[in-house]
Image (cartoon, helix red, strand yellow):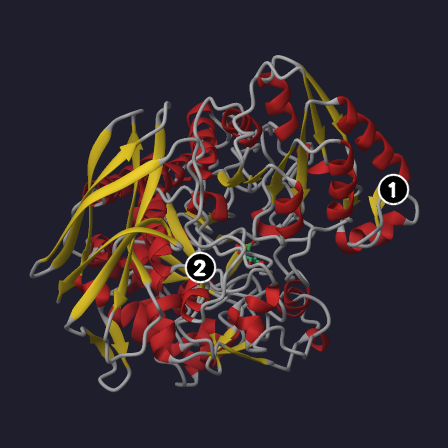
Amino acid sequence: MKALSQLFLPAIALAVVSCGGGQTTNPQDRLTVHDAEINEVIAKMTLEEKVEMLHSKTNMSSEGVPSQGIPDIKYTDGPFGIREEGVPTGFQSAGWTLDSATYFPTGSALAATWSPELAYKYGTGMGREARLRGKDVILGPAINIQRLPVGGRSYEYLSEDPILSADLAAEYVKGVQDAGTAACIKHYALNSQETNRGTVNVIVDERTMREIYLKPFEAAVREGGAMVVMPAYNKVNGYWCSENNHLNNEILRGDWGFKGFTVSDWGGTHSTMGAALGGLNVQMTGDRYLGPALIDSVKAGKVPESVVDDKVREILRVRYAIEPIPEDEANIVMTSQKPQQQIAHEVAQKSIVLLQNDGILPLAKSTPKIAVIGLNAKASTAAGGMGAGVKTLYEVSPYEGIASHAEGEVSYAQAYKNYMGMFGRWLGANDPSVATEIDEAPSPELLDEALKNAAEADVVIFFSGTNKSIESEGSDRENIDLPVSQNEILAKIAEVNPNIVTVNISGGPCDLREACKLSRAVVQGWWNGLEGGNALAEVLFGEIAPSGKLPITFPARLEDSPAFALGNFPQKAEVQGDLFGNQYRQDVQGQNRFRMQYSPDAYYSEGLLVGYRWFDTKDIEPLFAFGHGLSYVDFEYSNIKAKAGKDAVTVTFDLTNKGSMEADEVAQLYVKYENGAVERPEKELKAFQRVTVAPGETVKVKLSFDLDDLRWWNEEINGWDLEHGAIDLLLGAASDDIRLDATVTI
Ligand code: BGC
């Protein structure tokens, strides 16, 4: 084993060196350095040995080449923490004691930092913990575009904007891989809804796909060097993602130069010929398609053996690039370690978004009596949500964070019951503490206690929001309403104490219109990892200034958002049961009656007008716009200068902190084509930067983007095209808060 891991060492060293910033070549090229050696390995393998590598060995591993001493590949979920160890046959807990991991802030929280540097650190943290557990591939980051405010996995994903998603995804991947673990970007592609996720057929035009939905994947492959890609469950334009020749062979391998391998989402492989010729390397899970049936297809001359060889080569490239960890060297310390906990803390601090504030925030630590009200102040957000749940080493709740930072008295009242989806309905009959309906009326006892605490306090901090039964893989929310009568409870509280700060704990947007009316300040707190409660308290008490910015539009009404306005979502036809259980039963257990036959179409006819692109173009005012986020200081933008060079557009300006504390600002640069011939959204984000500014200080900030980033996908030439002419550069603190502008000619 030792000798083997030494064999792989040079590959690792090479990977790290070439991962450094500023590279001009495709980082994918580092995967091919051992091809000669790998070809020799393949030459010695039987067909059976090769095919053995193309499907699951256990629920979270695929086979190496035992006859030549090449170890298996070990996978682990997921995007926000190395998942609890499961038994080899499934997801049930293996009952380990050292597998508690660092629970990092979830995707939308990471994106709210608008910090590629933090995304990189986050990736290194994930990568290091994967190594401690002996894992080769992290099934993450999850980087689909947040198309729907109600999306069950919107909290896992980063943003509604392709550039913000792309920059963060690329850095996350670099971080993971610099730590010696391979990143598997998922779910490729257009897996932007959970409703019918296992069958839905996304109908999308090529331009929208290239400019919006594929951008994060392209950046993660070309800039980040992602070694593994997970084709999604859904179909795109009629073909399953796991057998989509256009996505997997023409775009991923052809256009982007991907040299690693693809692994289907669990239960997302659908046929032998489709998967074999449509670009899938590894079937997860089971061997129904890329197992004995593939051997037969090769023997029958239907699939050339060279296709199998190519698949094996791509897998071995990753195997050679990632040092295998011998079993006796893994799992000897706790997975969660201090440096990673600190990264999680820093991300949480910079993700919190101050949505509204009349000056009540920051709160004085000496406030004599604070009433913390609402179950979300104490509820854990680490576990749940299926693949993305984390067995966290610890989790500082918002209540604990506030209580440990306050100098006065802090009371707590639960105010509303826990809503646990269908599990709640089963439990609810016997357990009065669980809400059986999502809009259940307030419990008189809980309400009385909350009102009593509120009346006695100087300030109320009300915790609204959802939980991981409401926002979860496998289903979408029905709406963005606050659940379990939170608005009604808040209105009653406001009658006894108007000094309310509402902190909304959710992964995706909620309808906060009532909360905004009834509260003096409103904060978006996300699902913020194991240090989330401390980070929140630091912001509420003004130890640090809030600096998160929304990575997704918060619509006033769900009907205002594009897919709903156009009637594109939800599709009427629902297939009973989630795909995951059903296909697993079929693929692994051979129970064919669970096969889903029907594929409802999801039309993406809003095209490029996703998120703020829609709201701006259609002139619809959202509740809070993309990029919005206040601070405790005011920033002044001045002295803009813009230049269009041969390869890039550069903008410089002065940013002054007019307040009395250090604070970060995220400056955002949008582009608008004033008289463009090509149809485009009103404006589009092209560059952004987080800047730390001392009180009273003025810093010079430079933002730039490549001319290539202005290109649009021209379906007539089937390629990228640049439109020349005048463009407006709109610089500001949010998509609806443009402070300066300039015009350049391209
Ligand atoms: C999810 C993936 C996850 C996989 C393995 C699937 O249900 O969609 O994101 O990585 O399960 O847990």
Confirm whether residue 518 shows in the render: yes
Element at badge 1? loop
- 585 and 693: which one is in front? 693
The local crowd at label 2, few if under 14, some if 14 to 19, many if 20 or more residues have their Cα within 10 Å, is: many
Mark 1: which amino acid? Answer: Ser
Quarter of the picture containing the C terminus is bottom left
Q: Compared to 192, does 412 lie above or below?
A: above
Confirm whether residue 87 shows in the render: no
- In the image, farthest residue toward the right: 430
- 134 and 255: which one is in front? 255
- In the image, farthest residue toward the left: 646
Residue in the picture at 44% in, 78% down = 204
What residue did someone put label 1 on? 443
Quarter of the picture containing the N terminus is top left
Q: Position of residue 73 (x, y in %)?
A: 43, 50
Query: How many numbered marks does the figure carry?
Result: 2
* Residue 700 lies in quadrant: top left
Q: Compared to 719, does 409 lie above or below?
A: above
Residue in the picture at 41% in, 79% down = 298
Element at badge 2? loop
What residue did someone put label 2 on? 160
Q: Position of residue 661 (x, y in %)?
A: 37, 23
